[in-house]
Amino acid sequence: MSKIKPRHIAEAERNGIKYRTLEKRVYDMKMPPDEACTMPLMRESANWDRWKDVAVVNYTTYAQRVYAGWREEDAALTDYLHKPSGWDEVKSKAAVGYQTFYNRLRSGWSVEDAAFKQKVRKKKEEQLQ
């Protein structure tokens, strides 16, 4: 495991990075010290100000996308990833919630089965005896 050296601390200070941030990056996020002391801080106003008037997503979504490696333009202008097709038609009559519906679709269930099959509730072991 890499350790923070005095030269890393000095470079981080020159770049406006606090020691605690440097420490968190190196020890918690397992980032190499040389990268941790030079990687710019993510500030809300850094580039969001440029995109906020035309963005189709909110700041949090934009920031998460940029952090995940999206280009700024794509992060701001790509609409939200939509829920799976079929949910809007069945949501008012569905026997399960959205997350269960989505998980079932990912497991290969049909839209009808995913939406309308009741959840199987396991009884407590004490009730079975």
Image (cartoon, rainbow, N blue to C red):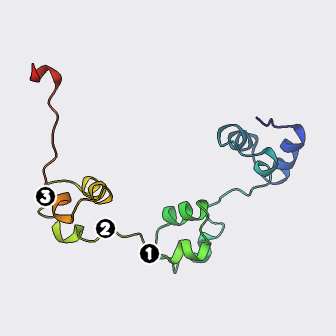
Q: Nearer the viewer, residue 6 or 90?
A: 90
Please say whether residue 52 is visible from this viewpoint.
no
User: As displayed, is residue 35 above or below residue 127?
Assistant: below
Per the image, label 3 sits on a secondary structure element best described as: helix
Front of the two marks 3 and 1: 3
User: As displayed, is residue 82 above or below residue 94?
Assistant: below
- Which quadrant, please, contains the N terminus? top right
The residue identified by callout 1 is 79
Q: Amino acid at mark 3?
A: Phe
How far apart marks 2 and 1 lie (CA) works out to: 15 Å
Residue 126 in picture, x, y percent from top left: 14, 19
The residue identified by callout 3 is 116
How far apart marks 2 and 3 lie (CA) works out to: 16 Å
Q: Is residue 76 left or right of residue 33?
A: left
Q: Amino acid at mark 2?
A: Pro
Q: Earlier in the sequence, mark 2 or mark 1?
A: 1
How far apart marks 3 and 1 lie (CA) works out to: 29 Å
Residue 118 in picture, x, y percent from top left: 13, 50
Per the image, label 1 sits on a secondary structure element best described as: loop
At label 1, counting other C-alpha atoms closer than 10 Å, the crowd grade (few under 14, some 14-19, many 20 or more) is: few
Q: Amino acid at mark 1?
A: Asp
Per the image, label 2 sits on a secondary structure element best described as: loop
Q: Nearer the viewer, residue 102 or 8?
A: 102
Please say whether residue 49 is visible from this viewpoint.
yes
- Which quadrant, please, contains the C terminus? top left
Residue at 42 percent across and 70 percent down: it is: 80
The residue identified by callout 2 is 84
Q: Earlier in the sequence, mark 2 or mark 3?
A: 2
Residue at 72 percent across and 39 percent down: it is: 23
Q: Nearer the viewer, residue 35 or 63?
A: 35
